[in-house]
Image: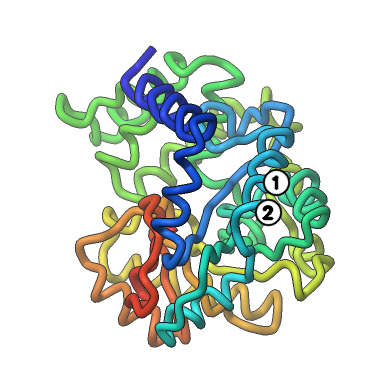
Amino acid sequence: MNIKEFLRCIIYLFGFLLYYSGLFYFIIELRRRRAKIITYHDITDKDNPFIKGMNISLSTQTFRKQLSFIYKYYNVVSLHKVVSDIKHNSPKKKQISITFDDGYKSFKKNAFPILIEFSFPSTIFLVSKCLIDKKFMWKNILRFLCNKYSEEETISIVNKILNKRGLLNSVSTVKKIEDLQTYYSKDTLELICDELIKNFYDQIKEELNNDNLYLTIEDCKKFPIGLVKIGNHSYFHYLFSKLTEKEIDKEIVQSCKLLKNAFGFSPNFFAYPQGIKVVNANIVEEIAKANSIGSMFYASGCDNKYGSDLYKLDR
């Protein structure tokens, strides 16, 4: 058991004790005048090789239990309503909104039918290059290869690619897949994924069907307008803290253009890839404002005070 798994177990145990001791209700009451926005990714009962190992999946049974809890103790509203109330510093008791990141197909197959049972609205933050250009996110390609073969074999090939290109050194040697976005630029990530696909193409070509992993434009257009809203999750989901100002501009501007062409409008909401705060937030916010984005969201696990800065909201 690694440190992350250990901490996750501690958090689950803490949550279990809070729930069955009844203390959770007092915590809800203490935080009742804070706006909560929760985030999901993948709701499934069957492991997807493109996602397995990323720790972002939840079973349909657990998802339904969580929604039942939310239904009992919170007032679920649209993200537009939450943001509007935050903007106007108009506190509401126990208000919560539900969001989904990355636009995985499991939203349509598994999450949406359960949301309908509760009549809960939600917002899906889409990665435009996956939705429109039918490309796979680099993290899904890497995770797929790790699951199909092994993480050790995939990492070994990654290091060979980097060494061949003169990009490998003792500091940046990849020991686990997560190291890639820590040490390398988006161009290098693209290079690695392209090379990996070439190396394994004959063995994996039949499984490289984008429509089986991500929502399509047609899928999104079929959702009831009043229950499912579209949000912007960047052009290709690169960590903004590793991008130049020019690259960030492209991630936002290109995504806005593609989503507007697909749906006839550019979403007002933008969720940071991986939800991570960036040191150059002011620059990012200026780019967002110039492209008619009204709110931006991190994913630090905190709730929001009414009257907060709309470009620094938490989920």
Residue at x 79%, y 69% (from the top left corner): 221
Q: How far from the left and from the top, in percent, is residue 140? A: 55, 38
Q: Name the kind of residue labelled 1 in the image.
A: Ser
Which residue occupies the foreground of this view, 169 or 280? Answer: 280
Judge from the rendering whether residue 228 lies leftward or rightward of residue 3; answer left or right: right
**Disc 2 crowd, CA 10 A, few/some/many (<14, 14-19, 20+):** some
Judge from the rendering whether residue 137 lies leftward or rightward of residue 34; answer left or right: right
Which residue occupies the foreground of this view, 266 or 171? Answer: 266
Q: How far from the left and from the top, in percent, is residue 274? A: 42, 50
Could you tell me if the residues under marks 1 and 2 are in contact, i.e. CB atoms within 8 Å? yes
Secondary structure, mark 2, is helix
Label drawn at residue 68 = 1
Q: Does the rendering let one see residue 13?
A: yes
Name the residue at the left extreme: 170
Label 1 vs label 2: CA separation?
5 Å
Q: How is the image coloured?
A: rainbow
Is 39 above or below relative to 286? Answer: above
Judge from the rendering whether residue 53 lies leftward or rightward of residue 44; answer left or right: left
Label drawn at residue 163 = none
Is 181 above or below relative to 54? Answer: below
Q: How far from the left and from the top, in percent, is residue 159? A: 33, 24
Q: Which residue is mark 2?
A: 71
Q: Name the kind of residue labelled 2 in the image.
A: Tyr
**Disc 1 crowd, CA 10 A, few/some/many (<14, 14-19, 20+):** few
Specify the quadrant of the image occupied by residue 192.
top left
Residue at x 64%, y 54% (from the top left corner): 103
Residue at x 69%, y 39% (from the top left corner): 65
Specify the quadrant of the image occupied by residue 315.
bottom left
